[in-house]
Image (cartoon, helix red, strand yellow):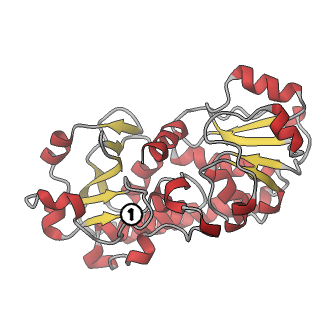
Amino acid sequence: MRRAFALLLALAAAGCTAPPPSARPAESRRLAVLAPSAAETLAVLGESGRIVAVGDYVVWPPEVAALPRIGAYDAPSPERLLALGVDLLVTTAGVAGRSERERLEAHGIEVLELDTSTYEATLASMQALGERVGRGAAARELVDGIERRVDAVARSTESLPQRRVLVVVGRDPLFVAGPGSHLDRLLAAAGATNVAGDLGAPWAQASLEAMLERAPEAIVDTSDNRPGVERGMLAGPWGRWPFLPAVAAGRVASVDPWRLTIPGPRLGESAELLARIVHPESLGAPSAAELAGPPAPSGRSAAGEAR
């Protein structure tokens, strides 16, 4: 759980620092991908065949299971990437420091850093990645489709009551989705008010007592990424506070973080899922399968490494 949340904090780093188009070739053919969101975007664009190595938290698409793993957060050594024939390292902004970036580029390995700190930045990064692999038109279609889907969710919740919602991304200590995060944006579309919307950071440490005092009417808990954890509309550990409106109304969801915390091509699906958790009586509660993580390929634990 701690490792998963550490990556989530890394995703909050700002700045897309890809080199200007004039400084790079039209396409890269052999990619090392540290960012789960980038791997998923490439798969949706039909370009997962370019990936030759992945970060420890990449579990989708399933075919990455057999690829070499190159670490979690730190940029791998040029020697390691050169041995794999890599010409482009794709990661999130802030993972590779300036010295690491210069060292990689001195060996002919480009570094593409994608900003996924907000909903809007994530859409722009998907477009940038698509352009980089010669799939700009397909990326535009992907982004447009996400926006249409999120807009449709917003229309479907317009006449429903705005509910106060807490999204938990880490426990012990408690971390929540705050203002500016992609989940904050999706909550708004889902007909919800983020009870942590004033905490000052996209992924913020919060006081449990303060969150309880805000009396959330729905709780989305993505904090437990252990294999075999039961998913569904379950009170779970929140059941110890039966006075909470969310608990009393049965609007507490145990969700695999893979479903919601990766800012990538499933943003539209995530908005729909949040809307159904917040408004189950109107939109239909999601099933346990819809809240679970991806199947673990080749014996790997998807829950523990999907972030």
Question: Left of 287 or right of it: where is 115?
Answer: right
* Mark 1 element type: loop
Question: Left of 89 or right of it: where is 82?
Answer: right
Return the residue found at the far left: 243
The amino acid marked with disc number 1 is Val
Q: How many numbered discs, if any?
A: 1
Residue at 65%, 68% in the rendered image: 298
79 in relation to 163, above or below: above
Q: Quadrant of residue 163?
A: bottom left
Question: Left of 38 or right of it: where is 187?
Answer: left
Q: Is residue 47 visible?
A: no
Measuring from the top left, give residue 120's x and y in whole percent.
55, 46
Return the residue found at the far top: 99
Measuring from the top left, give residue 71's x and y in whole percent.
66, 42
Residue at 24%, 63% in the rendered image: 236
Q: Which residue is disc 1 drawn over?
A: 255
Measuring from the top left, give residue 266's x and y in whole percent.
56, 63
Measuring from the top left, give residue 186's x and y in whole percent.
43, 56
| In the foreground, 254 or 118 | 254
Q: Quadrant of residue 165?
A: bottom left
Q: Are there few (<14), some (14-19), or many (20+) residues within 10 Å of tag 1?
A: many
Return the residue found at the far front: 299
| In the foreground, 20 or 68 | 68
Residue at 75%, 52% in the rendered image: 68
Question: Left of 191 or right of it: where is 28?
Answer: right
